[in-house]
Amino acid sequence: MVEKRTYVCNEIGVAWHNDADRVRIKDIKVYQENGTVLVWIGIDLHGGVLGIDEVFAYLTPEEAMTFSKAFERCAIAALKESS
């Protein structure tokens, strides 16, 4: 059974949470805010000792669509490869 790690955030956005010890990326959130698409990443740089550092990027709608299309292409290729 695959553990569900994604959930809805900010009404139309999506978030991903990871509890694995050896993975440094702990949280990713993507949502719309004031005409931009906010990409938020929580990174554990210190093995849980100092908490999670946060990195933000504001993408234009066009930049977000470029990433969206790439995610879709990659997901389709991965699904084909895994079946």
Image (cartoon, rainbow, N blue to C red):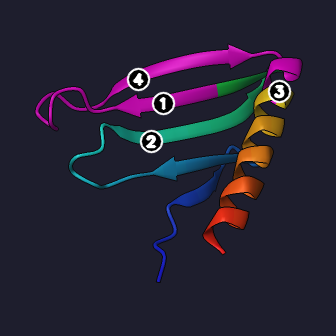
Asked if labels 4 and 2 touch by Cβ distance under 8 angstroms, the answer is no
**Residue 28: where, in percent of width, then height?**
52, 39
Q: Tell me if mark 3 has few (under 14), some (14-19) or many (20+) residues whose alpha carbon lies within 10 angstroms of its own.
A: few
Element at label 1: strand
Asked if labels 4 and 1 touch by Cβ distance under 8 angstroms, the answer is yes
| The stretch drawn in magenta includes residue 62 | yes
The residue lying at 60 percent from left, 58 percent from top is 7
Element at label 4: strand
User: Which one is in front in this view, the residue at disc 3 or the one at disc 4?
Assistant: 3
Q: Is residue 29 left or right of residue 60?
A: left
Q: Is residue 16 left or right of residue 27?
A: right
Magenta segment boundaries in residue numbering: 39-64
> Residue beneath label 3, please?
66
Q: Residue furthest front?
A: 81
Distance from disc 3 to disc 4, alpha carbons, whole Å, reads 23 Å
> Residue beneath label 1, please?
41
Question: Between residues 18 and 34, which one lies in front from this camera angle?
Answer: 18
The residue lying at 16 percent from left, 28 percent from top is 46
Q: Residue furthest bottom?
A: 1
Q: Earlier in the sequence, mark 3 or mark 4?
A: 4
